Image: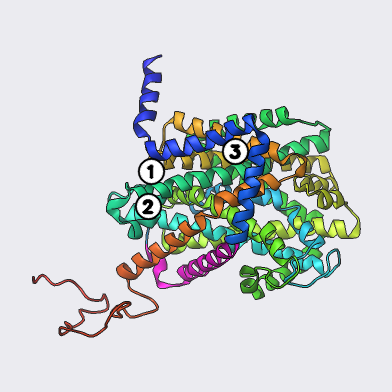
Amino acid sequence: MSDAEKGMVDEFLEELDLVVFAFGALLTVGVIAAFFINETLVTETIGTVYDWVVTYLNWALLVIVFLIVLFLLFLIVGPWGKIKMGDSDPEYSFLSYFAMLYSAGFAAGVVFWGPTEALFYYDSPSPLFGVEGGTAEAIPIAIQQTLFHWALPQLAVFTIMGLAISYFAYNYDDVPLRVSSALTPILGKENLDGPAAKVVDILAVFATIGGVATSLGFIGSQFIAGLNYQWDIALGNVGILIVVTTMTLLFTISMVLGVDRGIRRLSNFNMILFVVLMLATFILGPTLFLLLLGSQAMGGMIADFTSMSLYTGAGSDGGTGWMNSWTVFYWAWALSWSPFAGLFIARISKGRTVREVAFTGIGATSAATIPWFTFVGGTALRYHHNGTADFSSVIANSTPEVSGFILFEAFPFGTVFMVAFMILVTTFFITSADSSTLAVSMMTTGGKASPSTINRVFWGVVLGMTAAILMIIGGEGGTSALQNAVIITGAPFAFVCFAAMLSLITDFSSSYGRVLLQDETVLVGSSAKTEPEPESPGPGGPVESDDD
């Protein structure tokens, strides 16, 4: 072994947080090994745990995500929005910052579900609305439900973690850039290396692996479906492993290049291709219809936002099952991404204000997502409803990965569009994977901003293998294994996100003044004054006296 190789190995061993790395690695590698030993046992175990989670925790996910959305909206317009992350200037331009946040957040899911999700709601609308499936009345409801799932709520859980981690890491001394730092006021600054913090970081690794592997599995299955649909290249399990391995090598190269040379440049390319494909769909599709449809769906989402957020299906036939299959799945998926996306957002948010991070996280990203689902999803709905394109097999067989190719085949120069779509799928796979691998590496090193190459490559391989396994487990049953796995890993992290929100409220209230109550209001115990209160020093609030 050369001196350079020894140096890389030494760097890898020295940087590790052994407890977090060992638990995360052993758990994930153990699942991979178990799959090759007994695939049936792994599949049945995932199904059993999934049933328990959606039975007992579904309501909690709905309530927690709704409260986080309200809090972030308040931060955008309220007085706490001017608080800054550290005292330096932002490292990236706003457009690059937005592109990285969007590409590394959930854009992979946006590309996968854009052409297909509204089709399922058109066929089987939410029982909340009482609309018959397959009718013209179901079309705006389908887009409304899609916009609800992909606008504020999913984005909110990424953003709350990014805000909490970056605020405490950049505004407190000796607080590392890691997930458990989001709970600094609750755990105590002196306990960030203690057992409770380790549990949070281990849970973050577990959630991230499940969420990211699910997303990579979705995109990988979409890429493989494209090969089969366009060129009749059918790949079995070995083919799945080959495709995912190739993509893993690509994102590993991008990851090793680093944030500035790799992730930033590829994210900018992603957004350009994303916008071009979206605008082309708008122009070549039913343009006027899409404008009317988008306006009505947006109005419906705003009017029904609270009832859609807290709809549990209680008292309606099939309502709870529908809600578990869609809304709970999406919230759990977002929650499983929240530690990784939050850590990555924190990594690139130094120097920005709370308002800027909150607005970019749920405002700017929603502004990019809503047109995509309206134009691409709305065109697919229109074409299916009037017979221009046939998505019946997608709906009947639950194979959403094929929808994009059926849609773009109906366009002039359809092959060009399908190739562009496959390129977009691949590049989003790479940016999602390399940024998530960076985040997992940071989690297992105690918050090191630039983990060693060996660490990043190890987690890249693990994520790629896990994605391939979930795709194989899904088999002809589509994406059910991916959805079940992400609910299992993401649901427990809802309580961490809720605690992160409480941590921010606690710190902002004590450091920058309460908003709802007076600073002098006693929250617990008697409010009686035992000593005369000193005169107020001014609008800044009370100050400490030098007297003993």
Q: Are marks 2 and 1 in contact (CB under 8 Å)?
A: yes
Q: Along the polypeptide, which appears first: circle 2 or circle 1?
A: 2
Disc 2 crowd, CA 10 A, few/some/many (<14, 14-19, 20+): many
* Residue 299 % position (x, y): 69, 73
Q: Which mark is residue 447?
A: 1
Give, as a three-letter code, the residue at label 2.
Ser
Q: Along the polypeptide, which appears first: circle 3 or circle 2?
A: 2
Q: Residue 108: tell me if it is visible.
A: no
Q: Is residue 161 above or below residue 302?
A: above
Magenta stretch?
57-83
The quadrant of the picture occupied by the N terminus is top left
Q: Is residue 40 magenta?
A: no
Q: Which residue is mark 2?
A: 181
Foreground pick, 542 / 213: 213
Q: Residue 364: tell me if it is visible.
A: yes
Foreground pick, 545 / 366: 545
Image check: 201 left or right of 327?
Answer: left
Q: Which mark is residue 279?
A: none
Foreground pick, 95 / 42: 42
